[in-house]
Image (cartoon, helix red, strand yellow):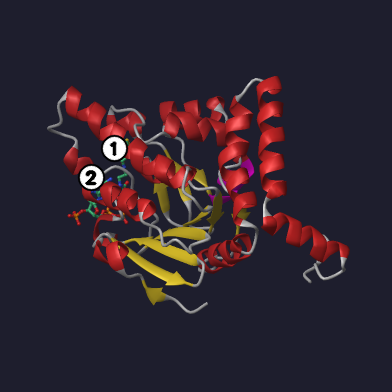
């Protein structure tokens, strides 16, 4: 894949390095001296980036520069915060991470080193997670006297369950990359140094799907899972009919019937 620096709004976000290769956008957290700790500026820049993805983007990858994905909340910014500021600060994170979860395109996170606190909340807002063996996961909020504020209480239990998250927060338990994979935090565990390449490969594969079908998976699927079954089944029927009615779906089905498309497990 041949990456070029992003242009326009995406080029003016100094705490992110954003590059584009065809339909894939790669956003790299770029605060390695602070272990990609998420200060307010970086959270705002993530929001701006995901609001302004190029119209022809079909998938995005988030990674972290340096030895760690992210050390979470920038603790230097919280010491003097009032209660009211704290609520607004958390809502800012929610806006940014919602923009990732509900982005127009699927998002893959490439994880290595520390994926802790708000860093894990950020990773949980992506749709696919790839880890290297150096990755470790923790929620040190309990030890710091605070609580998750970046959507973690809503998203992380949906990945690993309330019981595991309770353990991580009460005891400070750190999961290594194998434990994170077994618990369901990550989808893929690859060799050290291969995480970004795997994430980009997955993004390219996802980008080749029909966009509306991807949109249904990332937007409708988690919402249906939150609904009562009869409501979910009705929404499924609507989403399915909408996706099926799209020309991209019709063309793909015609291609399969004409033996121009790959069989399951094989490319065309
Ligand atoms: C930071 C932060 C940070 C590093 N805020 N400055 N997150 C945490 O509790 C994790 C705290 N960080 C660590 O445990 C370690 O830094 C790491 C295990 C991630 C990495 O260790 P290491 O040895 O590679 O780096 P370091 O020497 O600890 O840190 C390098 C610099 O980054 C140093 O600054 P310097 O000016 O002395 O060079 C650190 O102070 C700085 N740094 N992490 C601020 N987090 C929306 S609610 C979310 C709530 C949370 O995320 S709570 C979890 C917070």
Percent position of residue 105, x then y:
51, 53
Residue most extreme to the bottom: 2
Residue carrying label 1: 92
First to last magenta residue range? 177-182
Q: Is 207 colored magenta in this rendering?
A: no
User: What residue is at 35 percent from the left and 43 percent from the top?
Assistant: 96
Q: Nearer the viewer, residue 138 or 154?
A: 154
Residue most extreme to the left: 80
Instruction: Label 1: state its secondary structure.
Output: helix
Query: Where, quadrant-wise, is the C terminus in this rendering?
Result: bottom right
Q: Is residue 112 left or right of residue 118?
A: right
- Distance (Cα) linking label 1 and label 2: 8 Å
Percent position of residue 178, x then y:
59, 49
Q: Nearer the viewer, residue 235 or 32?
A: 235
**Residue 265, visible in the rendered structure:** no
Percent position of residue 13, x then y:
26, 60
**Residue at mark 2: C-beta within 8 A of ligand 1:** no
Graded by Cα atoms within 10 Å as few (under 14), some (14 to 19) or many (20 or more), the crowding at tag 2 reads some
Percent position of residue 146, x then y:
29, 28
User: What residue is at 56 percent from the left and 51 percent from the top?
Assistant: 128
In which quarter of the view is residue 239 placed? Answer: top right
Q: Please say if 89 is above or below 61.
A: above
Instruction: Label 2: state its secondary structure.
Output: helix
Residue carrying label 2: 40
User: What residue is at 42 percent from the left and 48 percent from the top?
Assistant: 115
């Amino acid at each position: 894949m041949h990456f070029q620096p992003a242009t326009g709004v995406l080029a003016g976000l100094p705490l992110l390095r954003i590059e584009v290769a065809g339909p894939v956008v790669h956003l790299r957290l770029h605060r390695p001296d602070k272990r990609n700790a998420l200060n307010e500026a970086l959270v705002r820049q993530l929001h701006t980036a995901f609001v302004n993805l190029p119209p022809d983007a079909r998938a995005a990858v988030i990674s972290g520069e340096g030895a760690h994905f992210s050390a979470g909340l920038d603790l230097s910014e919280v010491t003097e915060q009032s209660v009211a500021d704290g609520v607004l600060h958390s809502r800012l994170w929610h806006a940014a991470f919602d923009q990732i979860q509900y982005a127009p395109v699927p998002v893959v996170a490439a994880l290595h080193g520390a994926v802790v606190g708000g860093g894990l909340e950020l990773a949980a807002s992506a749709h696919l997670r790839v880890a290297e063996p150096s990755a470790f996961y923790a929620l040190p909020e309990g030890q710091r006297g605070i609580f998750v504020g970046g959507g973690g209480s809503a998203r992380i239990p949906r990945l690993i369950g309330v019981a595991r998250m309770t353990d991580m927060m009460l005891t400070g338990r750190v999961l290594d990359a194998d434990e994170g994979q077994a618990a369901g935090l990550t989808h893929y565990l690859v060799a050290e140094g291969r995480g970004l390449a795997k994430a980009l490969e997955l993004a390219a594969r996802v980008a080749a799907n029909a966009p509306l079908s991807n949109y249904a998976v990332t937007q409708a699927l988690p919402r249906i899972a939150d609904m009562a079954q009869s409501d979910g089944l009705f929404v499924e029927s609507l989403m399915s009919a909408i996706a099926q009615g799209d020309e991209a779906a019709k063309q793909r089905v015609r291609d399969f019937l004409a033996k121009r498309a790959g069989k399951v497990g094989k490319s065309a």
